[in-house]
Image (tube, rainbow, N blue to C red):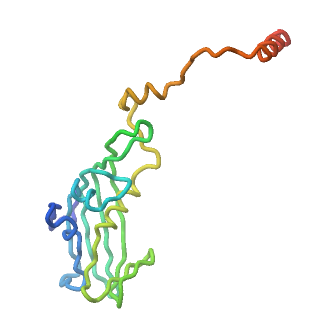
Amino acid sequence: MLDLIKKSYLCTPMDRMDGYIVDLKGMTDDAVSHRWVLMGDFFSAVQGKEISNGQVDVALRVKRTSEAFDLEFQYEGVVEVECDRCLEPMDQPIQGTCSLRAKLGEEDDDDGELITVAETPGTLDLAWHLYEMLALEIPIRHVHADGECNPNVMECLKPQNAEKPVDPRWAALEALKTKINK
């Protein structure tokens, strides 16, 4: 899928979130690549609201510059979200790219454009950043394709055409309206 892949990490229950830490301070090369396959254990551990499950391949390339570290992500896969119409789980394909910029400093900070990582330990935990990247790829409206929603829910959503007795005053107005339109 992605040509940036050199290392492969799969999330296991014992090291749920440790596999998403990148050692910036210890980088010996000018560029380092990582690969993850984010699956159910990852989404359970993050406990985000939008995505409950999925399988997404993520490739990261970290490039050291003279002032900072440029992190370039590429991802592709499927996440499980709740259908807006029937509230049942549905698969939502996602793919995209994202860039982050980080530098080493005195204490951890994230101003939205630049992430500052404390010199000690000099590592960046990417778990929440990965989750947010994927959540932002989900369309605002996500519904099953026609005919795939829960049929019981769809039956409840159909308008009920029960005949209600018409107030005689409205019936008289309707008759007047019909007479005028002739």
Residue drawn at x 57%, y 16% as measured from the top left? 162
Q: Quadrant of residue 61?
A: bottom left
Above or below 58: residue 90: above
x%, y% of residue 177?
Answer: 82, 15
Left or right of 122? Residue 102 is right
Q: Residue furthest bottom?
A: 106
Left or right of 133? Residue 10 is left
x%, y% of residue 121?
Answer: 24, 86
Rendered-image quadrant of the C terminus: top right
Residue drawn at x 81%, y 12% as measured from the top left? 172
Q: Quadrant of residue 25?
A: bottom left
Q: Nearer the viewer, residue 59 or 20?
A: 20
x%, y% of residue 153?
Answer: 41, 30
Report the label total: 0
Residue drawn at x 67%, y 14% as measured from the top left? 165
Above or below 113: residue 105: below
Q: Quadrant of residue 95?
A: bottom left
Above or below 40: residue 7: below
Rendered-image quadrant of the N terminus: bottom left
x%, y% of residue 102?
Answer: 35, 79
Residue drawn at x 61%, y 14% as measured from the top left? 163
Above or below 14: residue 181: above
